[in-house]
Each structure stands twice: as structure tokens, then as C-alpha cells.
Amino acid sequence: MNMAKFDRNIPYNKLPLLPPPINPEQDVRILQKLVTTPRSLAIFSSKVSRLPNPFMLINTIALQEAKTSTEIENIFTTEDELYKAISDEKKERDANPSTKEVLRYREALWDGYNTLKKEGEFTQEMIISIFRKISNSKSSIRAPQSQVVIKRGLSEYKPGEVIYTPPRGDKIIQLLMDNLFNYLNNSENDATDPLIKMCIAHYQFEAIHPFQDGNGRTGRILNLLYLVKNELLSEPFLFLSKYIIDNKDDYYFNLSGVTQRGDWTSWILYMLDAVEKTAAFTNSMLDEIINQMNATLEFASKRIKWYSNEVNKLIFSQPYIKAKTIGQVLNKTSRTTLTKYMAELTENRILSPIREGKEIYYINDDLVRILGK
């Protein structure tokens, strides 16, 4: 596309339909990435499948993805508030708005995953449902008259300047969305590598910008679900948002490169690099968590008679925990007994207590350390 023809202040109603007129697999750099990236994903999925209880760690990693994904859109919550909320139903209900947004992202991810498993394909209803979970609203695809524009943030050069105006008008967004879902679901008659299709579809979704807000978070969930659908991930958790936030300027530069210059190659290379490096990073995180779990189990079992593998799994399932949660696993309800047990865990520095009003939370400092990297 000739850059001179693109006007960021005018709705991009000429956004081309998919598939784009390119053959990215002719590029040697992309071909190399199509060897190394699936290999990293395969190692990651294999490692997850060998875990004694994969879902024990899935929510922990999904929580980090949720937290980082919301940070990309400048929605911040402290880890302290977030960890307290997932360990206490009352805290979750009373959590601040930013914390609730993170928790809704994780809920939307799992809802989308379960819907995809049930229906077997991507639908507009599924994406709208994901968006509604994220935004905590009953909104849908933005109206034709909605004057949505993308502007620079307050901390950026020329704050408030319009950098992109997404498509707008009667039936235009619907046409583009129908085309996107056809592209995502058409695997039998399309020889394009699924990783390439994920990169292309992610650009298209962000360029359509179908919702008033929350498009970035919705699009990142769509990425994970597409990798699962095409058996490149066994479960929908990959810490992809960390790479994007660490390379945020490159993300937006390469997105705009497709729009303004038709530069698909740089965008695809960026996204493939994000997936490959994220898989390696998450592999490393899993290794650290598993190694720490084994070390803690060995250490605690020698010092605490009642300590078991089930308790060990529980305290590594979330960074903060309450005594009653451990009591449920041990089938112990006596406050005196639980107080004694938690004192033993504290004395042996397996957990450390913090008090907030009448509540006491117990922190797995080792897990917090690993997740905070």
C-alpha cells in the first residue's frame, strides 16, 4: 500500500480482506522461524503434559498473562492486591477496579477456551462473549456512527494525536469480521502455516478494532485460542503479553507498518519471535516452579509430619493462601489445629504471614519471586 494514500484521520474503510496478497513463506527469515518457533512450542506443551497436575500451574501462569495483558493498556494493579483477591472470595468481590479487570481477563480466557472446545470453531458470538467478560458490559460490536479513533498516550510524543482511525460505517465492520472468522476457520482449504495465520489474523483484528475498548486484550486471548485450536499449544496459557510489553514500541511500529506500508514481513517476524521467545521464557519459569516445588516438598516432609504432596501442590497453586484453604485439603476444621499447622509452616519459612485487619494471608515467597521475574 502506498503510504501517501493512507490518512490516519480518515476511517480505514479500505482495509483489505483476508487473505492478504502475500506469500510470507518465501522469505528465508520467516522459514527459519517456522522451524524454531513450533519446536519451542512443542517443548513447552510436552513439559506441561508431563506435569502431575497441569491445571495446578495453568491458573498461576494465566494470572500473570492476565496481569501483563492489562498493563499493556495501562490498567495497573499491584501483585499484592491481585494475590489477595484470588485467595479470598470476599477480597475478590471488594477488589479495586484494576484488580477486577485482571481477574475478568483470566475468566474470559477460560470461558473462550471452553467455548472453543465445545463448538470447534471461532464465531462472532464467542468473541463478543470474551469482550463482555473483559469489559464487564453488555456491549457488542461498535455502532456505525461511533467516532472511535486511536490516539497517542499522555506520556508519548505529541500526546492526543490521532494515529489511526479504524473502519466505520454501516455493514463495514460486520463484513470485515465475517471475513476474519472465515479466514480463521478455513484450515482444510488453506495451506498457510497456522503460525502465519495467527500473525495475520491478529493484525486484522486490531485493524478492524471492532469494540469500543478492550480490543487488545480480546485479540491476545484470540491468539492463544488459535494456537490451541491448531494443536500448537495444549492449554491456553503462554506468557505472550510480557514480550509485547517489553517490546511495546516495536509492537505498535510493526502494526502500523502493515497499515501504512503493507510491510507484512516485519510484522510476522516480530510475532513469531514473540511466540518463540515467550515459549522459552515460560519453559524456564515452569522449570523453576517445578524445581522449587520438589525442593520444598523434600525439605518440608523431613520437618513437618502432616506435610504432604497435596499440601505442597496447593501452596504452589497460588502465591497467597489462607489457613482454611489448607484445612480443606487436610480435612481439618479446628482453628487450634490450623493455627498450629500454619505456625509450623511459618517457622520453617515455607510460608510467611501478613495481617490485614482480622485476616491473615500466607505468602509463598519462592513462588512470588519466580513469578516476578
Image (spheres, grey):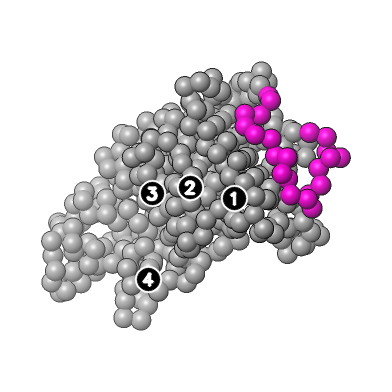
Tell me if residue 10 is in the magenta stretch.
Answer: yes
Tell me if residue 177 is in the magenta stretch.
Answer: no
Residue under pointer 1: 210
Residue under pointer 2: 127
Which type of secondary structure does the marked residue at label 3 adopt?
Answer: helix
Q: Position of residue 291 (x, y in %)?
A: 35, 43
Q: Earlier in the sequence, mark 4 or mark 1?
A: 4
**Majority secondary structure in the magenta region:** loop
The span from disc 1 to disc 3 (Cα, nearest Å) is 21 Å
Relative to 221, residue 155 above or below: below
The span from disc 1 to disc 2 (Cα, nearest Å) is 10 Å
Residue type, label 3: Trp
Q: Position of residue 139 (x, y in %)?
A: 51, 60
**Disc 4 vs disc 1: which is toward the camera?**
1
Residue type, label 2: Ile
Image-quadrant location for residue 104: bottom left
Instruction: From the viewer's perspective, tell me whether residue 173 is left or right of residue 364.
Output: right
**Cβ atoms under marks 3 and 4 closer than 8 Å:** no
Instruction: From the viewer's perspective, tell me whether residue 221 is left or right of residue 358.
Output: right
**Cβ atoms under marks 1 and 2 closer than 8 Å:** yes
Report the span colored magenta: 1-22
In the picture as drawn, the residue positioned furthest to the bottom comes out as 357
